């Protein structure tokens, strides 16, 4: 298995969410442009559902999955597709929210051992035979949509970004036994779904209102850049000393008519009918706010209080954008670190992709934009014909091709370049949320029904 060094870590080629340092690129050999259930299929293995992505170890493709109240970590032989083991992870005590799955975070592996994060159980490590090595209970979490941040390995540390509406933190535990090495609170962060990347001896974290760097050794916050949206979903990508990250979230005023320019005292004075110093659901100014109450009652007390209102107002003024950031320095480096910013045709979820000197952004509906990384100049923008669909998976690349997995199960193959072209669209006809993996000249695509392995036949 090919390995590479990232910062302090030596990791397998596609060992974490989006492969090497979250970049989505792994040049391991030629890959087919045409594939499907009867073409260039190496194997197909039926699986329970889950939004998490596959990662590849020495022997196994690791995944997490769930059915009903139970969730597992699975090891699938990467050569034959045979399920080798399935280890228990959790059993839910109540029905899980429908907008997510309880197994959305992607595992990470050091090649043999695998590490997973389950919202219902915390961090767990299994050995190559599926035996539980250790478990670190975490939660409960204050995230209205459930958790989706994936853990990453940096040297002998397992690091988790746990962003939520109350009590966000960055956590480092020993990969050997799960003991806590450090924990850094992130009071500015609301719920988000980004996974960190590594630069030198720092963890780069995309979160609410800012991108920040933390020391791998101590967890101390080193530098940060302000101006991001209030909810982070995508994973940043790195090229040398430049960081590319996009941050987008619809404003609450697109969902509900929000008060503008009003202080807490004014807002309270207009709506607090029972004068108890807070706003209850029955005092909401419109039905839609009451229906989406979880977006306003951030700490789950049942009321909008002053701290909730201040966060809501901050969310209203947050800005969306695609940023190129020069990394390094100390403290707030916003004024000098932002190289360029783009504000149009930004995706909600898919992460950026930097491949062979071109930066790509994939927007829902199948709109693909290519940028010049150094300047932010748009090189080409167009629709991925044949796959004009919703996209939750992030694009990945190898062998001169981009692979874009749409929600419907259509996987578009795009010839990379400033003047990219669509080579073809392969329809698996199965709902797909997971980002594909690439390893040893094979493409692994996880749908809600199965794991596929494709390769040139």
Image: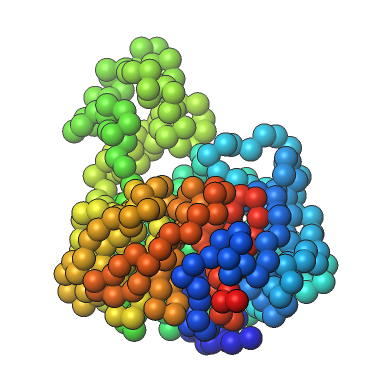
The residue at the point 45 percent across, 77 percent down is 398
Colour scheme of the rendered structure: rainbow
- Residue 31 to residue 190: above or below: below
In the figure, is residue 348 to the left or right of 47? left
Q: Quadrant of the N terminus?
A: bottom right
Q: Nearer the viewer, residue 395 or 305?
A: 395
The residue at the point 27 percent across, 29 percent down is 258
Q: Is residue 432 visible?
A: no
Image quadrant in which you'd find residue 101: top right
- Residue 230 to residue 226: above or below: above
- Residue 416 to residue 348: above or below: below
In the figure, is residue 25 to the left or right of 270? right
Q: Nearer the viewer, residue 60 or 388?
A: 388
Image quadrant in which you'd find residue 378: bottom left
**Residue extending farthest top:** 273
Give how far across and how far down residue 115 sits, in percent.
Answer: 67, 67
The residue at the point 42 percent across, 34 percent down is 295
Give how far across and how far down residue 30 sits, in percent.
Answer: 50, 81
Give how far across and how far down residue 236 sits, in percent.
Answer: 39, 67
In the figure, is residue 133 to the left or right of 253? right
Q: Is residue 260 visible?
A: yes
The residue at the point 27 percent across, 17 percent down is 270
Give how far across and how far down residue 158 sits, in percent.
Answer: 61, 71
- Residue 277 to residue 219: above or below: above
Image quadrant in which you'd find residue 382: bottom left
Q: Quadrant of the C terminus?
A: bottom right
Q: How many marks?
A: 0
């Amino acid at each position: 298995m090919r390995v590479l060094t990232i910062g302090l870590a030596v990791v397998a080629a596609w060992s974490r969410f989006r492969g090497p340092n979250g970049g989505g690129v792994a040049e391991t050999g030629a890959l087919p442009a045409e594939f499907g259930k009867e073409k260039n299929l190496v194997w197909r293995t039926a699986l329970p559902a889950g939004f998490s992505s596959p990662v590849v170890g020495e022997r196994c493709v690791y995944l997490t999955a769930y059915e009903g109240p139970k969730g597992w970590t699975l090891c699938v032989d990467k050569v034959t597709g045979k399920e080798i083991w399935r280890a228990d992870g959790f059993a839910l005590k109540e029905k899980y929210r429908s907008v997510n799955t309880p197994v959305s975070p992607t595992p990470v592996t050091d090649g043999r051992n695998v590490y997973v994060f389950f919202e219902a159980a915390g961090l767990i490590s299994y050995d190559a035979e599926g035996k539980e090595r250790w478990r670190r209970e975490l939660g409960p979490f204050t995230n209205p949509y459930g958790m989706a941040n994936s853990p990453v390995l940096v040297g002998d540390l397992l690091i988790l970004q746990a962003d939520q509406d109350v009590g966000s933190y960055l956590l480092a535990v020993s990969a050997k036994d799960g003991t806590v090495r450090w924990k850094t609170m992130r009071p500015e962060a609301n719920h988000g779904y980004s996974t960190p990347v590594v630069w030198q001896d720092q963890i780069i974290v995309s979160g609410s209102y800012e991108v920040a760097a933390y020391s791998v050794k101590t967890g101390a916050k080193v530098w940060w850049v302000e101006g991001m949206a209030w909810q982070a979903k995508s994973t940043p990508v790195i090229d040398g000393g430049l960081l590319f990250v996009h941050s987008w979230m619809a404003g609450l005023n697109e969902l509900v008519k929000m008060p503008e320019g009003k202080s807490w005292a004014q807002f309270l004075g207009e709506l607090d009918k029972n004068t108890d110093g807070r706003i209850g659901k029955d005092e909401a100014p419109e039905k839609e706010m009451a229906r989406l109450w979880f977006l306003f009652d951030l700490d789950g007390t049942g009321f909008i209080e002053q701290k909730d209102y201040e966060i809501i107002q901050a969310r209203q003024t947050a800005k969306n954008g695609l940023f190129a950031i020069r990394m390094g320095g100390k403290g707030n480096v916003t004024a000098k670190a932002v190289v360029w910013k783009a504000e149009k045709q930004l995706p909600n979820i898919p992460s950026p992709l930097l491949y062979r000197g071109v930066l790509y952004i994939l927007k829902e509906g199948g709109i693909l934009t290519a940028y010049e990384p150094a300047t932010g100049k748009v090189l080409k923008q167009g629709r991925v014909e044949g796959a004009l669909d919703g996209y939750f998976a992030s694009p990945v690349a190898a062998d001169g091709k981009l692979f874009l997995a749409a929600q419907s199960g259509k996987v578009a193959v795009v010839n990379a370049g400033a003047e990219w072209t669509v080579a073809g669209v392969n329809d698996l006809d199965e709902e797909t949320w997971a980002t594909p993996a690439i390893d040893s000249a094979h493409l692994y695509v996880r749908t809600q029904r199965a794991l596929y392995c494709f390769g040139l036949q």
